[in-house]
Amino acid sequence: MAEITNEQLVARLQEKFGEQVFDIQEPYGLVTVTTTRENIIPMLQALYEDDLLQMQFLTTLCGMHFPDNKGQELGVVYHVHSLQNNLRLRIKIFFPEDDAVVPTATELYQTANWMERETFDFYGIRFEGHPNLIRILNVEEMEAFPMRKEFPLEDQTREDKINTFFGR
Amino acid sequence: MTDNKTDITTVNAPEGVEGSGFFATSLEKVVGLARKHSLWPLPFATSCCGIEYMATMGAHYDISRFGSERPSFSPRQADLLMVMGTIAKKMGPVVKQVYEQMAEPRWVIAVGACATSGGIFDSYSVLQGIDRIIPVDVYVPGCPPRPEQILDGLMRIQDLAENESLRRRNSPEYEALLSSYNIK
């Protein structure tokens, strides 16, 4: 089987999805594309069923937060991998902070269940259709989403950490 | 380290009145002496300090010399809770439950920077010192502390156990301390 190059992958993506994929980059040899929230699940499905690409393994699903990116503060990154072709693709979606709802990928990938719970836990992104969307790593009574940039790095209840001791 | 029998030291008898065939002293001193030399620790080891404690249990440092022959991995019969390692906020209720299940008299050592103050992990997930959930008697500094330091902490607990009044655990101050931690 001939190896699929990144150029062939990009050409295939544009042929299949056309205007739905944009901002195509290739940092460190990993093809990275951005798509829309509405399109992400059909796109993952199509990549899964594609005879040539056969991207049937979701390696990563995680959140990201860029508070300066107005109207597109939050995002989710998907890495799909083709074990047949040894080929990987990174797909990003962005959406506003006050409308952090994404369709779930659990219908397609069982592994997305855990990853989406983690993303909800740390970023507060709600995945519509997820069977059990509750916190998974942090304590249940936590109210904040600690991986968001506005969350303070240090514990605010400490009284023994005075700035003068730390050269701040 | 020599191996001859003269290295052995025995515990001195407490103050008291000695005569031929009898020895009289106060009950408190006898009980203190017995408690001091039979502390049974409950090692609550979560990370690197736990590994250091395992070295303390080994033949070279030999915590058994102090009467701590049986590291009790159950709260039953344990006198001394040794919390060693990072306690995450999710682990906090477990530590508290273990402490509550121990019978009086009980002592607590916080071993290492994480157990005493959260250490370098000043973040949303880590409890900033176990004294936020249970009362602590001795803090052992270090990251991680050497076995000698853990033994020193144990010896400080021995001092407390030896000199503790038998009425201390029933005193209103002690009850106020426990109630400040919401422990019955």
Image (cartoon, rainbow, N blue to C red):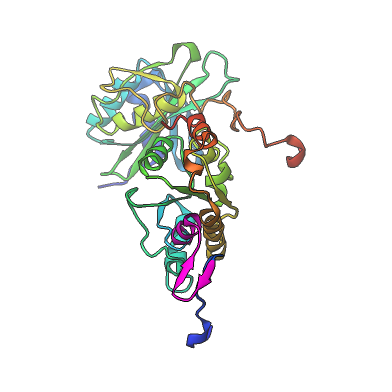
Expressed as whole percent of the image width and height from the top left, the position of residue A120 reads: 40, 24
User: Which residue occupies the foreground of this view, A17 or A164?
Assistant: A164
Q: Does the magenta stretch include residue B29?
A: yes
**Residue positioned 54% across, 47% down in the render:** B137
**Closer to the camera in the image, B103 or A32:** B103
**Residue A75 % position (x, y):** 46, 23
Residue A69, compared with residue B140, is above or below; it is above
Indicate the position of residue B87 as horizontal and vertical percent values: 47, 42
Relative placement, left or right, of A43 versus B92 is: left
Quadrant including the C terminus of chain A: top right
Number of numbered callouts drawn: 0
Q: Can residue A53 be seen in this view?
A: no
Outermost residue on the front side: it is: B20
Q: Image quadrant of residue A62?
A: top left
Q: Quadrant of residue B116?
A: top right
A113 or A161, nearer to the observer: A161
**Residue B131 in the image, given as x and y percentages of width and height:** 53, 39
Residue A78 belongs to the span the image colors magenta: no
- The answer to whether any part of residue B123 appears in the image is yes
Nearer-the-camera pick, A68 or A157: A157
| Magenta residue span | B17-35
Kindly give the residue lying farthest to the bottom in the view shown: B4
Q: What residue lies at 50% left-to-right and 15% top-to-bottom?
A: A97
Q: Which residue is drawn at 41% across and 42% down?
A: B99
